Image (cartoon, helix red, strand yellow):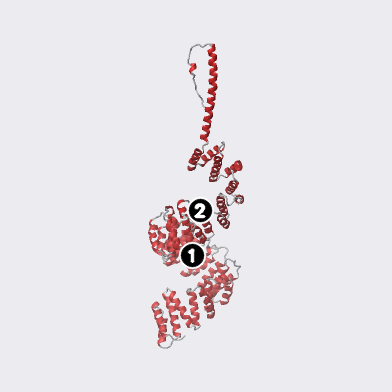
């Protein structure tokens, strides 16, 4: 750039007339002066241009300017500055550094189109590894994973940029759900750091291999965690891993560090409640109870886990209280609504809190719950309404549901039970015969009708209906249930051949369910095949050692076959696990009789006296005691 100079010669300031010779001399001198002046101007101009160029392309000033915009995260402005400098003639080292800055900007902006233009323009000026990496990253952004992995595979493990290529390759394999390849890729990085250890731990946790996840997390530098982006994440993953491994003590130790982060308070409380429950730390749960009751600041998951923990902890009263206090928090979604309502109704039913059940359940609730929960809710609701003398209101609700819901058979089943309990069996039969109630009648419909006829003791019509059902083409989905009910009704009607036939139609897997196994034991008791009961029950009790029904059937079988030394421990166990006093009295009488037959009179009298205490209304224990005293005890 040339400077414009204003110059006035002192020679042009005089007004005197000059001679011709003098003018020639002056002109010559002026010419010489102009030549000198031109030389000076050119020299000064070139000096300024070199100085300006030196200032424009000074590496320190360029770096300062670029760093300023980098710190501000003004990447668009920064990219424009870099592009402008790259168009100039620069020292080689500075030019290469600017190319690297340009690459970083494109990667930060995830600019696939910009990367393509950059590669087209500067391909010959960057290294092969940079070209492969940028090409691979562009394909990654375009979700062209096949070619992305192809480019990344060309980068040598000795190259510094291999680290980044391996990390992105790992992300690609993760998106493709190929966890093993992702793990192998990250393990291929030679100089692993805390970030890689953490990423490997995440991948192992996704594979549910929490032992390896913990192993990788324990390799992370604690100094790194304090200073860099991982921060709390390894501790959070450690907590989850230890919980999954069932090591709740170690989980508890890591949870404490999460409490230092205010934004993790919900996660901290959720895991703290869970681990406190698992480690039996009731004091922690007591302290949290007050906090949750008084505050609405936490996420629904925190209130839900505390509610569920108290349910499983058997503290139904506290669970019920927090439900009532934080119902809006606990009922946050339709899925959780059904589950949490299920738990609440279950607990209220266990406490026989029928008024609370009636307050919680109503037509609106019952008409909106998911189909899978409806049978349970209807059954509990029916018991609560009958228990509080509201049978008429129950009937109205069930009729309304019959009109509004598609699960007609479930509702008809509850209505038929209601009519049987109230003695209005004919009303139930008339309802079932109403063609408007249900159109295409499946086998389950006829079974409900048969149940009503059996309750009415109209065995003739019941038998006809059961015969009709047995000849129906029953779909495979409901076959087991239908034939199980047919076998049950056949047993009630004492049609033992029909029972054998219907029971044989049940699949082997369903025969092994507790309900059907008890049904078969009931059949064996009915036909007095005690040896069959002994053979059958002995194997079942290995699976269900405290099943009172199976124990009772086995005890009766031993008793009836005079194997009193075997019946004694069975009835003793029943007394131990039974809570109902009248049932305890029955078992005590059998136990007393067993001892009496073995000649152990003192033990026998002891249990007769116990039976009289548990059930004063029965007279068997007194009668048997009298017979022993008179030496007239008989089988």
Q: Residues within 10 Å of mark 2 (few under 14, many from 20)?
A: some
Is residue 279 placed above or below 95 in the rendered structure?
A: below
Q: Is residue 126 above or below residue 325?
A: above
- Of label 2 and label 1, which has the lower sequence position? 2
Viewed as shown, does residue 581 lie left or right of 157? left
Q: Nearer the viewer, residue 588 or 314?
A: 314
In this rendering, the label closer to the viewer, 2 or 1? 2
Q: Residue furthest bottom?
A: 631
Residue 566 vs residue 271, the one in the foreground: 271
Estimate the x, y position of residue 564 in percent, counting from the top left. 47, 83
Residue 231 in sight in this render: no
Seen in the image, is 276 located left or right of residue 213? Answer: left
Q: Secondary structure at mark 2?
A: helix
**Residue at mark 1:** 376
The picture quadrant where one finds residue 532 is bottom right
Tally the numbered discs: 2
Q: Is residue 451 left or right of residue 317?
A: right
Instruction: Identify the disc placed on residue 313.
Output: none
Q: Quadrant of residue 615?
A: bottom left
Q: Position of residue 280 (x, y in %)?
A: 42, 65
Toward which corner of the image does residue 273 lie, by quadrant? bottom left
Q: Residue 356 at x, y = what percent?
A: 41, 63
Residue that carries the numbered disc 2 in the rendered image: 195
């Amino acid at each position: 750039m040339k400077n414009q100079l204003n110059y006035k010669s002192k020679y042009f300031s005089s007004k005197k007339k000059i001679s011709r010779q003098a003018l020639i001399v002056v002109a010559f001198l002026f010419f010489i002066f102009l030549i000198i002046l031109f030389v000076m101007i050119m020299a000064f101009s070139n000096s300024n241009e070199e100085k300006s160029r030196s200032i424009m392309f000074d590496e320190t000033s360029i770096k300062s300017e670029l760093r300023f915009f980098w710190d501000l995260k003004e990447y668009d402005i920064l990219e424009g500055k870099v592009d402008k400098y790259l168009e100039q003639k620069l020292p080689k080292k500075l030019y290469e550094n600017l190319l690297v800055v340009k690459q970083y900007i494109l990667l930060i902006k995830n600019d696939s189109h910009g990367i393509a233009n950059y590669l087209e323009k500067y391909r010959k000026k960057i290294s092969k590894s940079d070209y492969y990496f940028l090409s691979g990253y562009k394909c990654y952004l375009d979700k062209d994973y096949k070619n992305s992995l192809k480019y990344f595979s060309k980068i040598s493990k000795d190259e510094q940029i291999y680290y980044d290529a391996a990390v992105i390759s790992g992300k690609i394999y993760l998106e493709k759900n190929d966890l093993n390849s992702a793990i192998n890729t990250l393990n291929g990085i030679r100089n692993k750091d805390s970030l890689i250890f953490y990423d490997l731990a995440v991948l192992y946790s996704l594979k549910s291999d929490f032992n390896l996840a913990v192993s990788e997390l324990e390799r992370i530098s604690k100094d790194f965690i304090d200073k860099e982006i991982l921060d709390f994440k390894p501790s959070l993953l450690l907590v989850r891993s230890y919980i999954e491994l069932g090591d709740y003590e170690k989980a508890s130790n890591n949870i404490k560090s999460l409490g230092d982060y205010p934004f993790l308070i919900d996660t901290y409380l959720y895991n703290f409640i869970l681990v406190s429950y698992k480690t039996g730390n009731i004091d922690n749960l007591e302290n949290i109870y007050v906090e949750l009751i008084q505050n609405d600041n936490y996420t629904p998951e925190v209130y839900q886990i505390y509610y569920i923990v108290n349910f499983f902890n058997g503290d139904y009263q506290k669970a019920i209280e927090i439900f009532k206090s934080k119902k809006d928090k606990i009922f946050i979604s339709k899925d959780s609504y059904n589950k949490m309502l299920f738990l609440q109704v279950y607990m209220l039913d266990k406490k026989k809190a029928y008024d609370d059940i009636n307050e919680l359940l109503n037509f609106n609730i019952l008409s909106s719950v998911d189909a899978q929960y409806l049978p349970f809710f209807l059954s509990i609701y029916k018991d609560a309404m009958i228990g509080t003398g509201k049978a008429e209101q129950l009937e109205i609700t069930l009729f309304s549901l019959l009109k509004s819901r598609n699960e007609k058979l479930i509702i008809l089943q509850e209505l038929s039970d209601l009519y049987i309990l109230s003695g209005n069996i004919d009303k139930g039969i008339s309802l079932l015969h109403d063609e408007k109630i249900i159109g295409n009648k499946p086998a389950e419909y006829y079974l409900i009708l048969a149940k009503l006829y059996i309750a009415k003791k109209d065995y003739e019509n019941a038998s006809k209906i059961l015969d009709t059902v047995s000849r129906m083409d029953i779909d495979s989905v409901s076959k087991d249930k239908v034939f199980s009910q047919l076998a049950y009704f056949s047993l009630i009607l004492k049609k033992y051949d029909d029972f054998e036939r219907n029971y044989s139609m049940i699949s082997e897997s369903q025969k092994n369910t507790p309900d059907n196994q008890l049904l078969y034991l009931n059949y064996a008791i009915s036909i007095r095949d005690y040896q069959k009961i002994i053979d059958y029950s002995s194997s079942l009790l290995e699976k269900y050692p405290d099943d009172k029904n199976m124990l009772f059937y086995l005890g009766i079988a031993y008793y009836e076959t005079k194997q009193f030394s075997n019946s004694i421990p069975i009835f003793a166990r029943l007394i131990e696990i039974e809570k109902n006093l009248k049932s305890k009295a029955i078992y005590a009488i059998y136990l007393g009789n067993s001892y009496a037959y073995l000649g152990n009179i003192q033990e026998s009298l002891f249990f007769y006296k116990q039976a009289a205490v548990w059930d004063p209304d029965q007279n068997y224990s007194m009668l048997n005691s009298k017979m022993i005293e008179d030496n007239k005890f008989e089988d």
